[in-house]
Amino acid sequence: MGEKRELIKEKLYQFICDDMYKPMRLKDIRFLLQVSDADKKRVEQALDELISEGKITLTPKGKYKKLDDNLLVGSFIGNKKGFGFVRVEGIEGDFFIPAKYTMNAFHNDRVVIKPEKKPSMGKSKEAVIVQVLQRGMTVVVGTFEKQKDFGFVIPDNQKVANDIFIPKKLSMGAVTGHKVVCHITNYGIEGKSPEGEVVEILGHVNDPATDILSVVRAYDIPMEYPDKVMMALDDIPDSISEEDTVGREDFRMLPTVTIDGEDAKDLDDAISLSYKDGIYTLGVHIADVTNYVKEKSALDKEALKRGTSCYLVDSVIPMIPHKLSNGICSLNAKCDRLTLSCVMDIDKKGKVVNHYICEGVINVDERMSYTDVAKILDRSDDLVVKRYENLVGMFDMMLELSQIIRANRKKRGAVDFDVAETKIIVDENHKPIEIKKYDRNPATKIIEDFMLMANETVAEDFFWQEIPFEYRVHEQPDQEKMDILSGFLNGFGVFLKPSQDETHPKELQKILEKIKGEPYEALISKMMLRSMKQARYSTECSGHFGLACKYYCHFTSPIRRYPDLQIHRIIKENLKGELNEKRIAHYKKILPMVADDNSTKERRAEEAEREVIKLKEIEYMSEHIGEEYDGVVSGVTSNYIFVELDNTVEGAVSVAYMYNDFYYFDEANYCMIGEKTKKKYQLGDKVRIKVLNCDKIKKTIDFSIIDDNIEGVG
């Protein structure tokens, strides 16, 4: 925001809060403040921001006034059943909004609420929505259902309570089963559905490619690059020249490798490693993206808008165009590449005793895969070992250093949530043909350990220089959530050491060690993760709870994450002595907004990635209806027993259809118990299931438990 608009905003707020003036319309504000034609737009933008910040409100009659002291402004979180919650920044816990008091608010709407003075006994705090300030959704992606003279769009987003009514003339000829993008024209009133018009038909719900496109549209993730961005690529070379290397440290003679998945194309990081006199010298060489993506350029603005690359099973929506991400920025083997390098001297205890950060130039010897490095480390494939025999010694040394670093991190209390990730294999038509656990082998751990070490080292360096910076922070979990977790763990005979103020990560680490190998290990790891706060970006270096470290940032992935790109720019200016008072003031001003935006875009990408995985799981399991699998009870609610299969797919068993008995939920012990048979299903139990049904619209996978005397349909 410009300085002038900031001053206008401050003046506007003081003016609106002045008791002399009653609520007034925009034209009255312009007249009384004698706003020039040039500043009219700035005034409107400032008023919108004051509303968004919850400082003023716009009445139904179109008048601006100060928000009443007994009202709050927050974001509405919808629910398919009609009720919702409102999250207010700075207030612990969300406000529950009963369905009759939502004022037809949609998910993500900015709303004004009036909290209950005193919550009813045993209930969470409640509130009533008194005004919808800003609509958070203008389009909905969903499945079209055609009727004779009209249609409906059933939203994919389970947080949108109502289907959208579509007049026939606004349906674009969509038929039942089409995935469509619907523009909302009317948000509805009590007793009347919201209305809209179809603006794009994405394809049929059963088309394997449609699900990814529907998620992309639903989350408003940009796919195509604007013409300005593509034109900017014309000025970027395909290779670097010797002139580009002037003033950089030359690492080209060092043995250097990249280690990534087989299908990776955007290679951010390369590793060099040597050992002498009890000291490991580890070089973490990161692609120098800022050499090509200059601040405020079209490329930079688009990268900030995207915030991160999106990995949607077999599709990638890159943060920066392929010419950069897969080309000159990617640390491809046998090519000279520019880097920002962090070189660390590490002793036998895993402590960084010396380091320096510099602009560098490298030439990667080999593009390695995690699979091949793992084979080299355990000597399980003679052909692979022979092919890379000149590098085998370095890989052995990498494993040795990785284990030292990991042991040191464990000693200080870092929590290693070894939760299985899902890997989905698809064919050329995007149809899933296999789902399995992602293999986390010693090679993946080597890269993880080295990247963490570089991130910590860079963060600590810049913290002590007292330079504006963007950190990665992970705050202490809420004690209330720790108390709930403690009660959950007690059911497994595992006890979390009580704490008066805060939980130390070492306590969680001890529990994970204790349950290693138990059938409920993955389940407890997941519950612990859900009890944690979400990591985010911040200008304050408040530490990282999960890693048990004081200093942490994201330095190692500037091709796919904007925060890394942002701090590279600061680091390079600092190295060149260009970080003067003016630039420091500039970064102090922009970084809080950049950090918040980066956190928001990261969450958007993560939610989209999870949703695509879920849709691909449903599509895969729909080909296996009637088949039996082994699984583990992963959750229990009043109506369902959730079961996770060995391939990480989770489905639900409805107790309403377990006909051999009446099952009730024992909330205290997180289990389902048969009233007559006393048959118990609790977390961690191994069960045999049959796949009954898969529904892409409802996003559900239904199982039945195969057990003596149970003939169920889910």
Image: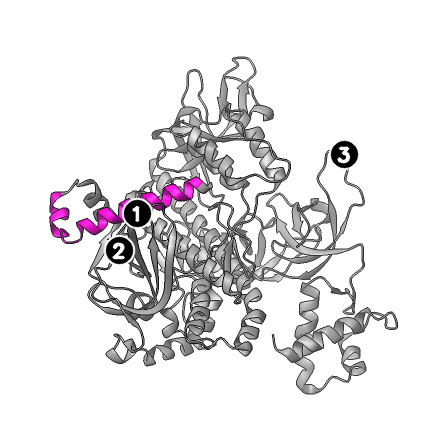
Q: Is residue 638 left or right of residue 210?
A: right
Q: Quadrant of residue 668?
A: top right
Q: Mark on residue 121?
A: 3
Image coordinates of residue 194 in percent, x first then y, are 63, 56
The residue mark sitting in front, 1 or 3, is 1
- The residue wearing badge 2 is 273
Question: Which colour style is shown?
Answer: one colour
Circles 2 and 1: CB atoms closer than 8 Å: yes
In primary-sequence order, the first of circles 2 and 1 is 2
State the predominant SS element of the stretch in magenta: helix
Quadrant of image for the N terminus: bottom right
Badge 2 marks a residue whose secondary structure is strand
* Label 2 to label 1: alpha-carbon separation: 9 Å
Badge 3 marks a residue whose secondary structure is loop
At 64% from the left and 53% from the top, the residue drawn is 76
Write down the region rendered in magenta.
382-411
For this orientation, the residue located farthest to the bottom is 37
- The residue wearing badge 1 is 401
In the displayed structure, 640 sits above or below 63; it is above
**Residue type beneath disc 2:** Leu
Number of residues whose C-alpha sits closer than 10 Å to that of mark 1, classed few (under 14), some (14–19) or many (20 or more): many
